Each structure stands twice: as C-alpha cells, then as structure tokens.
Amino acid sequence: MVKQKLVRVAAVLVIASQISSCGLAHSVWGEKAPPRKVVTITSNPLPPIETLFSDNESEAKSTFVQYKKMVLDSFDQIKGQSKNHLSLDEVSELARIGLAKLGDDPETSVLRARSALALLGFSGGVSRDQVVALLNWVDDHRVQGKAFYQTFFQSDTHELNSKSLIGLMQFLGSLIELGGGDALTTPQVGKMIEPWLPKNYHHARDAMDSGVNLVISVFSSLCGDRVDPTMWNAKKNGQCLRDLVDHFQSTAPVFDFMFNGLNPITDREKLVTANATLVTKVESWMKDHNHPTFPTDRVRAFSEKLGIPQPHNFFALTHWLPQLNSQSTEESFSPSFFIDIAHVLQNWVSTFTSAIANTQQNVTCSFKEWRKCKFQGEYDTASRLYNDEYAVLVRDNNLEFISKVSFYDSVADYLIKAFDTTGNGLVGSDITELVSTVVALLDSNAFAQNIILQIQEKPIDNSTTEDSISKLKSQGLSEVAAMAADLLPDRDGGKKTLLKKITSTIYDADKHPTYTIDRLGITSFIYVYDLLGGLRNEYMQSYDFSPVEVGSNTRIKRRRIVELLPRMLHDHFPRIYNECLDWGFERTCGVVYTEVLASAKAGTDYLAPSDLDILNLTSILLESMMNRCDRNHDDVLSTNMLDSFDEKSCALTVSTTLAKRLMKANIVEDNPKTQRLLGILNWLAPARWAAKVALERGTLEGIGIRAVPGVSLVSGPAHLGGVFSLAAEFMNGDKVKAIEAGVMGEHKDVGDELVYLNQLTEKYLPSHSWALRTSAAARLLYGPAKTTPIDAP
C-alpha cells in the first residue's frame, strides 16, 4: 500500500533536513560500503526548520521548498550500497558523523534516527521515491502540522479553535495511519519516543510508559473494537481518528461554537441544525462497537509519574462517578458517560440559541467578538442572577454572560437529576457532596492544564481539586456559597408570602440547620464559584499585591490585602464602598472584612490568593441580601406596620442566619456576647422592634426609649452601612470600641492594625467621595452626578 510505504520515510524528512549544509567532505561508509567512500553535500545555508511553522505563509512555503530541494539533492550526492536507497545502518552512520544532526551529540542522533525509522516501520531502509511521496504528504498537511506545533510547542495558553482541532485530528490520523498494521507494545513505543524528548523533559521521561498506556486506553474507549485494546496499532488508530472526524462532520458547527470559531448570531440556524443531531451522532458512534470502560487509574498513574501533587489530583477523586453515571464505577468511566456529556452540551447550546434568538449583531461586536455583544432577549435564569450593583468590571449582561449561565444551567440540570433521590427536584442531605462534585468538575480544566505544563517542565498550579474542596470546607465556604446560591437569584421577590416561606426555610438556622438546593441554586453556586475566580484573577492582575513564591506556591501578604481592600471595594462593590464611607470606613468595612479574612500562619504574613474569595463572597452575600430585601430598590430597608415580614425583617433574618453560619464555620468568633446579640435579633416582638431600631442606627448602644413599642414601630429606614455597622459589633465589639475611642486596639492578625486611628481613610482610600455606580437603580435614584466620583475625570 502507498500509505504503508509513506510511513517508512517519515523520519527521513527530519533526518535529511538536519544534514549539515555548509559543504562537508567525510568518509561515510565502513568496509561493506561501495568503492566510493567520500560523500560531499553542498547547499546554501537553510533557514531554521521552525520556520516551516511560521505564521507568515509565504515564508513558511519558501522554507519548505528549500528543504525539499536539499533533501532530494542529497540523494544525488550520497552513494550508499544501493542507488537512491539508504539502509537503516547507513542512515545511522550519517547521523553518527554529523551529516544528519538530530541531537547535541552523535549517540543521540543515532538513537533518534533508528527509533524514528523503527517506529514508522523503516526497518528495511528508505528510498528516494518514498521520500518524494512523504514530502508531498507533508506539503498537503503543512497547515495542520503548523497548528500542532504552535499549540503544543509555542503556545502558553494551549487553546485550539474547532477548525484547528479538526485539522489536527485529520493530520494525526493521516500520519499515524501511514504506519501499517504492525502492533507495538507499550515498552516498544516508549523506547522509540523517548530519544526524541528534550533532555530537560524529565517528568515526561518518567511518565513515558504510563503515558503510552493512557493513549492506548483513550483510543480503545473512544474507538471500541475499531482498534487494538492493549497495543499501539498505527493503521487502526489513524483510521479511527479519521472516521471520527468524518462521522461528526455534520456537528462541526457545535464544536466551532465551543472553540469560538463560529458566530452564533449570524450562524444561529446552522448551529441549531447541527446541535439537533449531536446526541444521536454520539449514540450511533458508540453503537455496536463494544466500547470498553475507560480506567481512571490510567490518568492517575500518568499524573503520579508526572509528579502532579498526590493524592490531590482530579482523577484521585472519583467517588462521585457512580452518582453521576450509574453505569460507571469509581475505577472506570462507562461509555454511556460520553452520551451524558452530549446531552449536557446539547442542552446548553439549545438553551443559549433560544435565548439569543432576538439578539442582533452590530458594529461594536465583530465575528470574533460576538461574546461582547449586548444581550437582547429574555432568559429567566440569567435575569435572576445578574445584578448590576457589583463586579461590573469582570462581567456584563452580554452574550458571554448568557453563554456561561446557560452552560451552568445545563450542568445543574444534569446534577439535580443525578443527586435528586426523591424526584422533587431538590438536593438536601448530599449538598456537601454536591458542592465537592461541582468543584471537581470545575477544576478538571485546571488539572488538564497542569498535565501540559508539567510535560513542558513549566511551573504548575499546586492549588488542586482536593485542596479547593478542603479550603471550601475549612473556611465554611461550601455552606456559605450554597447559601449564596439561594440568596443570589431573584426568586419572585414581589410575592411576599412565597418570599417569606423561602427565606424562613433557607435562613432560619435554628429550625432548619440544613437546607435544600434546587436547579436554580446549583446554577447559582457554579456562577458564584466562577465569579469568585474571575474577581480573584482581576485583583491579581490589576493590583500590586507584590506576590512572592513560597516553595511552588504564590503567596500575598495579609497586610497588603487590607491595604488594598478600599480599592477592591471602590472598583467592584461601589455601593458597599459608598455606604462604608458614609458610616465610617474603619468602623464598618474595616472591622467586617478583617474579621472574615483568614489569619496568616504563625510567624508569617502570607495568605494564598484564594483567601481573597471570602472577602468577595461576603460582599456578594450582602449585596444580594439588599437586592432580595429592598423590594422597591430605593437603597434603604423600610418598616411596614402592616407587614410582619417587611424589608427590615427580611434583612434581620438573612443577616442573623448568615452570622450564625459564619460562626459555625469558625469564620466569626463564637463568644457569649455575640450569642446574646444574635439571640436578641431572634426574639419576638417587642425585642424584634428593638432590633429594627438597632438596624436603623447601626448599633445596639443607646437604643433606650426608641425600643418602646409605638416608637419603634415608626423607626426610620435602615441602610446597608447600618447593616455593616451592626455586623461589626457582632464580630468584634472590642475593635469597634477602640475605633470609636480613637486608640490603637488589639490586633492579633497582621494588617488589622490599619483599622485603628483612621489609617485606611487617611492612607488607602482611592477616593474620599462616592465611587461610580452604574446600576440602573442608582442612576434612577441619584442621577449621574451622584453616582460619579467628584475627582473622576
């Protein structure tokens, strides 16, 4: 077969292209060589071989032509034992004396030459005609080869668009299919690949055999009986890749959309048509081909050999697999899992395309920038989640936001069906497990990135999946974030009885120590988790935290976090910044945020970047509480004598239970005074009336006659600043007293000293006037002049 012959010249292109081009005269052959023993190779200096993969197509094409001429001319100048043919030993000798330079030393060159020829089936040598055929193949596939080279050897982001991915699969399938039908064992394949690895790729060398086993298992699970389940068969594997591309060709628009290679506005109908067949295409591919399960220990073994931190990698946490897919086990993925994934993707694309049906493209969003197009349409889940009071610098109500939410919604639909054992659409007792599973799924991409980085001997992120879950549990973030999942979305806030029922169930920590979460809640949790990461990344990129490397981990100083706290609030939570500014920054935001911020380890001042999450989560919770309880969106919480669950009652219920859950999570100190204060807020009237007065005044001190029924019933409205002020008393009353007395108070944690003596106000406030608020409610209430800082340009 021509294709089988072509494979036997694959290495020659590399070998011949490296032959020295500066005019050499060497004795080449040994005693068995023909009489002519002198080989002279002459040519003009060639550009670096990497130029073949240049983005400049003209330059790349010219380089290929030069290399092709040099390779073919070399056959006219090299005289071996047979005309126009080089044996394996002759090629090895060329490598040994330096004419074919494949490494830094002769032995490396020989090893690479022999391993490449053996791997590709050139045990009998290679002819000139075979090299010509291979050169023609390379010319036909040079664009796909460039995508492969740039993605895995030059790119720092390792991102592929769909067209490049499909081209790459066709390229690899065509290449490895040329190798004929000989099956190779894992050690054989590893031994042939290893000489080609850069010398500094120590981790890849250590993981060679496990990596080959992983690739064989992937082909087996993906291709079924189309391939050899235990050995590497180049012809069968290559044919499967090409068949795979052909089979899913009609669904290409879906993958184009996933990899940002399709504009869903202009090509919406094409995307809808392709998406409609996605699941049936996956089912038909899996049918009748005996696809085996994929053993997760293959990934685990490979990552262990690579040195990915153990046992904290993604595939070491597989206990959730059977719950997601009943046919899978902790040890293996069932092939039906591919069908589950197809359903999630199809649901995502269907939801998204339906939501954007009325969105029109305009000049501000081009083909590649469609994600920035303003959303024009109705999507209930997204409208419940979007709050324009905060984080507007890292998200907008555009198509990127709609795409994310619709994907999260699709994942949530899948998870609720997997975890809901009662059929009522709610998850209760397994909520911690659910949170852990969601985090594991979200962290899977980071795990894949670490695999690539470790192979390339680049620094990896040691913040692994189990670390993330442990951090959530140890800081109580899993419980609080799940609580945020119910607080964040607008759940028909105008229906007072429904709101009261939902709020009581979710936030009455005494009557309901645990709570349930539904599909919207799961969507919200994923959204919150992603938003926390987006804010954290924005802070690390935009603010000078002066990070340091401690071992293999990035750390930032706790004091520096406190110094930058005003800037973070000013830029991303402007309403909170303004309220704290009006009520005394140190007395409100200063106390609350330094209390929830983690303590540094003894003898250090260092925290992890992920410790910023609790600051953002606290802000999101309080903003969401205002959004939920401030029903008329006038920036205050009012009292209504005719409504037993008025805006203040809503805020008291949410704030009190949030504090209790924070104490349960050991974020807020659980001391007798705090418990007494919380008890007051839980008392029935008339103590409840006193609590409403305290909320208005931001303190429990000096309430006096204001708590008397009749007076308290007509108490004034409360502000978010008052909520912060009251919360500060709950969290650390001693700090509050020291601030009010104007003295330096106790500061066990580094950075806490800044909340005393007006240090934050005098040194670290980005503005002494209101921060810019772009929300629709703020502009309606105050007008542009009151929402823009005086010192803004």
Image (tube, rainbow, N blue to C red):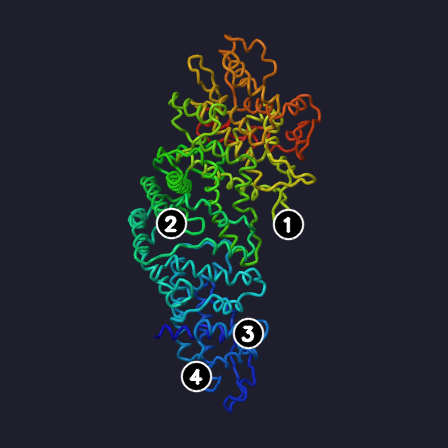
Comes first in the chain, label 1 or label 2 = 2
Comes first in the chain, label 1 or label 4 = 4
Q: Is residue 214 above or below residue 409?
A: below
Marks 4/2: CA–CA distance = 52 Å
- Mark 4: which amino acid? Asn
Residue 373 visible, this orientation: no
User: In this image, 703 relative to 494: left or right?
Assistant: right
Secondary structure of the residue carrying numbered label 1: loop
Residue 252 horizontal/vertical position (percent): 34, 54
Q: Are marks 3 and 2 in contact (CB under 8 Å)?
A: no
Q: Is residue 656 above or below residue 463?
A: above
Marks 1/2: CA–CA distance = 38 Å
- Disc on res. 551: 1
Residue 632 horizontal/vertical position (percent): 42, 22
Other residues around mark 3 within 10 Å, as few (<14) / some (14–19) / many (≥20): many
Residue at left offset 51%, top offset 25%: 657
Eye-nearest disc, 1 or 4: 1
Q: Which residue is mark 3?
A: 109
Eye-nearest disc, 3 or 2: 2
- Mark 2: which amino acid? Phe
Secondary structure of the residue carrying numbered label 3: helix
Residue 609 visible, this orientation: yes
- Disc on res. 337: 2
- Disc on res. 58: none
- Disc on res. 84: 4
Residue lying at the far bottom in this picture: please name it.
35
Comes first in the chain, label 3 or label 2 = 3
Other residues around mark 4 within 10 Å, as few (<14) / some (14–19) / many (≥20): some
